[in-house]
């Protein structure tokens, strides 16, 4: 089945489900801001765009209020546990069967997400707002087969039962008591995030904007009165506050912002639909802002009866003046066309009244209808005259939820603590939903042109005054370890979801205990710990390229190296991390993954494949790179990511220069962790208990790093660095091993004689193939030796090497 999304997404949409595109044969969403569809059904224009752009994509369902659905994902094959779980759950008509376990659909009641684990791993998970699930018949990424369910979800929507709000407690009690399962501590694998105050405010403002659109009737999938929207804001604030750590939010602040949006939009020409004030109490109606909304809406709002009475009154003032009648009809048509709540069928009912009012002026019904249609097109969104005018209106609208900028080939929006990347589709969707009735914004090419115009109008570097530092939840920490309030001019693209608490730097006992277990018997233990502290600090602060080294955690399996990388990865938010291995660094579009990232988890080094030395060195050192997003103009950016590897192989490259070798810092792991000492999900446990402490400990090493201007280099690193040099460079191995040719700064050796010794070494000692003489000279120079061309007594051109001494055979006298 090739066009999964095109064929089946419309069936889900017809059932009111906000189905969205996932990557082809993948569980991952295509859209970076996909979570918005948990609360907001995609518009018809956006859905049409998806069908055209992603016909072969898999289908995902974001859970939450937009769909009204949630799911229990059973992730165990133990029949006894499955039976216990299903005994706690209501019977549901829809079940998706997977390679392991199954997923069951229910009605959502605002429950928070949770996971239930045992010492053996995951048992089940509740998927609600902020989660999504792959829908049939999407193609499974591993099996290549279609996902299947016992029935079509769109056919059983009216039969899906509500899931009790106490379901987590019921499941834990049943599994723990009846099942005898030792459950992992609740929430340990995902500690409660701290959301910065500024970010909370921005999210509240954005939600108020969404509710305002619903009240105006711009969201065709929801229809709420102002009273219902105010109640929803209360619930949203309560749920949001329960899901994060920090001070409680004030729902009244959100309601005030909602009313502000409504009033501003009415002053801009929008009108509210009938019933917008249903359920409001007398006290609420007397609220100054609500009263102003009601008054201004009444002045702008046209109904059939108001239009009829108005035209009759106007014409009766000059009953014999045909020109007067025509002028007043044209005036009325222009006025009702501005009111987006005055639908075409309302105008159809008004046409006979207008024909009668015109009297002797002959105008057909189709002509009047055309007048209305043309007036509506001309009045749409302020009757913007060109794409730039529309672009400026969209920028103003989007910027309600945070300043909009365009830099490094992408849109970014301030979220209160940092800039988050916006997909072009987000801007496209906003135009499709918000720009109505304008002839300049009716087709895909119009939208694309407006998006491009917006990018030019908000083109501005994220970093206005570049200052090195990192965002914690409680502020921006600069290089002198001073905290500042979050601000756009710092240009940061992520925020750590926890506070900077320097007093906790001595509390990362589990983490340091793991390091002592791995390295405690090593002679350079203290050097290793200091170096690791420095590279974690450099990674967090985005300054790793200044120290020009990739990080390799090297050793056999089960030695703890992967745990270190997993802990660092889990400390960082998703928008600070990427996974781009070096063999992809040369691919078109690939380097965009590094934009805004400070950690690149590269995984295993290839055992046989070679690393492209020049590109590798350039990216590790932060040299500006040219790249492009697909279908967009190219741009240049400086990579700031630290590149981390965890491997049992040392790096290999055809670049034999000392420059490639010096681009690594290698941490050796040799002690295998005994089975009795291994802890399941150890990285999750450490992060849950010690992430603030580990971060503070790492920051503590920043001062030493800045003073040294280089990482602490453990003795084991230097030994392994030399091993990398020898394995990649046969000339280096020869010079280190051959007793006949030794380094001597005061000596000069005949290059051909040295080369002869090299060939002997390669054939009789190394059992390998040597390089050509010309390549040999180049490799000598790459190792720092000077090769000088001269003419001997016979005027024969020869080469000499400065810094080497040949003891056997006797060295020919060099000129």
Image (cartoon, rainbow, N blue to C red):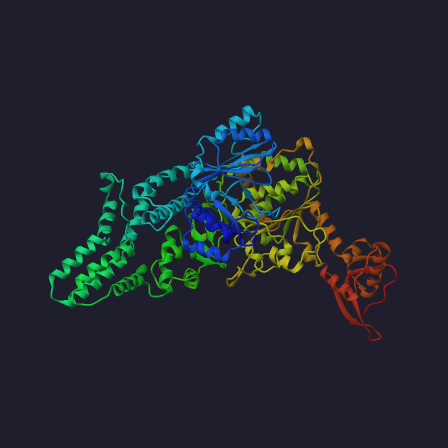
Residue sitting at 58 percent across and 54 percent down? 546
Side of 797 relative to 350 (left or right): right
Q: Quadrant of the C terminus?
A: bottom right
Whether residue 307 appears in this view of the structure is yes
Side of 427 relative to 354 (left or right): right
Side of 598 relative to 268 (left or right): right
Q: How many marks?
A: 0
Side of 607 relative to 20 (left or right): right
Residue farthest to the right, as pictured = 809
Percent position of residue 49, x then y: 46, 57
Q: Is residue 709 above or below residue 233?
A: below
Quick one: 119 or 100, which is closer to the camera?
Answer: 100
Q: Is residue 498 above or below residue 624?
A: above
Residue sitting at 51 percent across and 26 percent down? 173
Quadrant in which residue 752 is drawn: bottom right
Quick one: 600 or 544, which is closer to the camera?
Answer: 600
Residue farthest to the top, as pictured = 177
Percent position of residue 665, x then y: 66, 49
Percent position of residue 12, x then y: 46, 47
Percent position of residue 297, x then y: 24, 51
Residue sitting at 75 percent across and 61 percent down? 780
Quadrant in which residue 45 is drawn: bottom left
Whether residue 248 appears in this view of the structure is no
Quadrant in which residue 506 is drawn: top right
């Amino acid at each position: 089945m090739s066009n999964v999304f095109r064929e089946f997404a419309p069936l889900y949409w017809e059932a009111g489900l906000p189905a969205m595109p996932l990557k082809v044969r993948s569980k991952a969403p295509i859209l970076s801001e996909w979570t918005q569809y948990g609360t907001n059904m995609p518009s018809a224009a956006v859905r049409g765009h998806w069908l055209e752009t992603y016909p072969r994509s898999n289908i995902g369902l974001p859970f939450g209020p937009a769909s009204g659905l949630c799911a229990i994902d059973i992730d165990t094959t133990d029949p006894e546990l499955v039976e216990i779980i299903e005994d706690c759950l209501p019977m549901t008509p829809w079940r998706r069967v997977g390679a392991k376990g199954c997923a069951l659909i229910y009605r959502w009641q605002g429950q928070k997400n949770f996971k239930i684990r045992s010492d053996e791993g995951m048992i089940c998970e509740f998927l609600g707002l902020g989660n999504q699930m792959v829908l049939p018949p999407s193609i499974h990424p591993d099996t290549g087969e279609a996902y299947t369910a016992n029935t079509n979800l769109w056919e059983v929507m009216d039969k899906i039962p509500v899931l009790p709000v106490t379901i987590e407690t019921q499941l834990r009690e049943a599994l723990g008591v009846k099942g005898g399962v030792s459950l992992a501590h609740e929430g340990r694998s995902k500690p409660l995030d701290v959301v910065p105050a500024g970010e909370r405010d921005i999210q509240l403002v954005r939600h108020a904007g969404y509710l305002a659109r619903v009240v105006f009737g711009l969201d065709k999938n929801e229809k709420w009165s102002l009273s219902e929207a105010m109640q929803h804001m209360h619930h949203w604030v309560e749920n949001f506050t329960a899901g994060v750590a920090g001070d409680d939010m004030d729902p009244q602040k959100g309601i005030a912002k909602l009313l502000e949006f409504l009033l501003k939009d009415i002053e801009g020409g929008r009108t509210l639909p009938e019933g917008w004030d249903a359920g409001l109490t007398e006290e609420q109606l007397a609220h100054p802002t609500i009263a102003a909304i009601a008054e201004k809406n009444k002045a702008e709002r046209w109904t059939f009866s108001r239009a009829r009475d108005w035209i009759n009154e106007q014409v009766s003032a000059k009953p014999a003046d045909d020109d007067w009648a025509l002028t007043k009809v044209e005036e009325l048509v222009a006025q009702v066309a501005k009111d987006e709540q005055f639908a075409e069928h309302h105008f159809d009912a008004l046409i006979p009244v207008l024909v009668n009012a015109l009297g002797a002026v002959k105008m057909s019904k189709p002509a009047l209808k055309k007048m209305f249609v043309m007036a509506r097109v001309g009045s749409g969104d302020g009757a913007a005259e060109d794409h730039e005018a529309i672009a400026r209106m969209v920028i103003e609208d989007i910027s309600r939820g945070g300043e909009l900028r365009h830099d490094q080939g992408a849109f970014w929006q301030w979220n209160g603590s940092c800039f988050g990347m916006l997909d072009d589709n987000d801007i496209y969707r906003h135009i499709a939903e918000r720009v109505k009735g304008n002839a300049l914004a009716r087709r895909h090419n119009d939208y694309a042109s407006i998006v491009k115009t917006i990018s030019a109008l908000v083109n501005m570097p994220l970093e206005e005054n570049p200052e090195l530092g990192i965002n914690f939840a409680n502020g921006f920490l600069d290089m002198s370890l001073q905290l500042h309030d979050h601000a756009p001019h710092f240009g940061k693209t992520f925020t750590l979801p926890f506070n900077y608490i320097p007093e906790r730097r001595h509390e990362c006992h589990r983490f340091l205990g793991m390091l002592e277990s791995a390295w405690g018997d090593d002679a350079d233990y203290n050097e290793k710990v200091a170096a690791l502290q420095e590279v974690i600090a450099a990674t967090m602060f985005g300054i790793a390229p200044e120290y020009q080294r990739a990080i390799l955690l090297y050793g056999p399996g089960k030695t703890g190296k992967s745990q270190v990388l997993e802990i660092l990865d889990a400390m960082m938010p998703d928008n600070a991390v990427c996974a781009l291995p070096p063999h992809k660094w040369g691919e078109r579009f690939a380097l965009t993954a590094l934009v805004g990232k400070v950690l690149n988890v590269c995984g295993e080094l290839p055992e046989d494949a070679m690393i492209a030395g020049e590109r590798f060195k350039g990216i590790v050192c932060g040299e500006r790179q040219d790249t492009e997003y697909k279908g967009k103009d190219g741009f240049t950016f400086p990579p700031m990511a630290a590149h981390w590897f965890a491997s049992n192989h040392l790096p290999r490259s055809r670049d034999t220069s000392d420059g490639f070798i010096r681009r690594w810092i290698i941490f050796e792991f040799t002690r295998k962790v005994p089975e009795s000492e291994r802890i399941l999900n150890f990285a999750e446990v450490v992060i849950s208990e010690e992430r603030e402490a580990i971060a503070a400990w790492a920051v503590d090493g920043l001062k030493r790093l800045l003073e040294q201007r280089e990482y602490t280099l453990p003795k084991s690193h230097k030994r392994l660095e030399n091993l990398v040099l020898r394995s990649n460079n046969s000339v280096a191995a020869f010079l280190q091993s051959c007793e006949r040719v030794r380094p001597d700064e005061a000596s000069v050796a005949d290059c051909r004689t040295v080369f002869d010794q090299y060939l002997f070494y390669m054939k009789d000692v190394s059992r390998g193939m040597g390089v050509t003489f010309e390549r040999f000279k180049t490799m000598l120079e790459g190792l720092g030796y000077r090769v000088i061309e001269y003419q001997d007594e016979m005027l024969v051109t020869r080469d000499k090497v400065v810094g080497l001494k040949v003891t056997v055979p006797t060295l020919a006298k060099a000129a």
